[in-house]
Amino acid sequence: KAGVTQTPRYLIKTRGQQVTLSCSPISGHRSVSWYQQTPGQGLQFLFEYFSETQRNKGNFPGRFSGRQFSNSRSEMNVSTLELGDSALYLCASSLGGLADRRSYEQYFGPGTRLTVT
Amino acid sequence: LAKTTQPISMDSYEGQEVNITCSHNNIATNDYITWYQQFPSQGPRFIIQGYKTKVTNEVASLFIPADRKSSTLSLPRVSLSDTAVYYCLGENTDKLIFGTGTRLQVFP
């Protein structure tokens, strides 16, 4: 079974620009969560989508947004990029949502490395 | 959600058993304890999860004392390919909050 895929794998943007990252979950998985990983802050939760609805959100500014489509694919958008947004952005999928104790085990994609200059 | 404290790094040799202990003093009564493994340039990979006592799967064991304020991930007979960062987290039905992780280096 194919794993979680993320595109693009690498991206270079300039301050002030916006960026959209894409995540395709494992077939049959309905939950997609997004994380930001930086050397200084580690892995930080951004948000979770389940059946096209955002169900949980981390402590990130409104410049970070996302959505989920009916086929469970998800996109994450960052507007007005800042240098501090340079990070590895990871998405993870699971069968159930984070509230479903029986099937929330998350499978992570390889990430998108975003560099803001 | 439980805040976790782990050693920043550990060294071991091939064939040895490695035990990584994590402290999670403020774990909630309904938090599960979960461990993830991460290789460079890859997303974290679920290793094992438990609630209390001992859990064992094909790759690791997880020991959780009765007070649940700590947990120990045990990797039997590590190999070079076990060199990675290991995260423990106290997890409930809200969101995953990762700690800083333990960087395990396995030497030949």
Image (cartoon, helix red, strand yellow):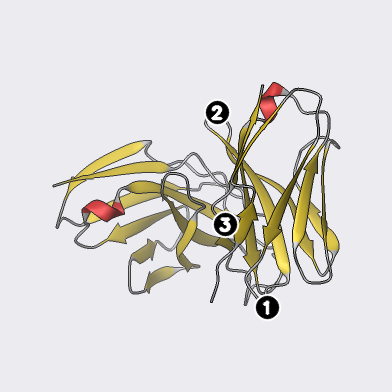
* Subunit that carries the residue with mark 3: A
First in sequence: mark 3 vs mark 1: 1
Category of crowding for the residue at label 2, using alpha-carbon neighbours closer than 10 angstroms: few (below 14), some (14–19), many (at least 20): few
* Tags 3 and 1 touching, CB below 8 Å: no
The residue under label 2 is A40
The residue under label 3 is A109
First in sequence: mark 3 vs mark 2: 2
Camera-side residue: B99 or A85?
A: A85
Camera-side residue: B39 or B17?
A: B39
- Where is residue A72? Give x, y as percent: 76, 68
Q: Is mark 2 on a helix, strand or loop?
A: loop
Category of crowding for the residue at label 3, using alpha-carbon neighbours closer than 10 angstroms: few (below 14), some (14–19), many (at least 20): many
The CA span between labels 3 and 1 is: 15 Å
Judged left or right of residue A25, residue B43 is: left
Could you say which quadrant of the image residue B11 lies in? Answer: top left
Name which residue type carries label 1.
Answer: Gly
Judged left or right of residue A91, residue B67 is: left
Q: Are marks 3 and 2 on the same chain?
A: yes
Judged left or right of residue B78, residue B103 is: right
Residue drawn at x 37%, y 39% is B7
- Where is residue A100? Give x, y as percent: 69, 72
The CA span between labels 3 and 2 is: 21 Å
Residue drawn at x 51%, y 44% is B4
The residue under label 1 is A28
Is B63 situated above or below A34? Answer: below
* Subunit that carries the residue with mark 1: A
* Subunit that carries the residue with mark 2: A
Category of crowding for the residue at label 1, using alpha-carbon neighbours closer than 10 angstroms: few (below 14), some (14–19), many (at least 20): few
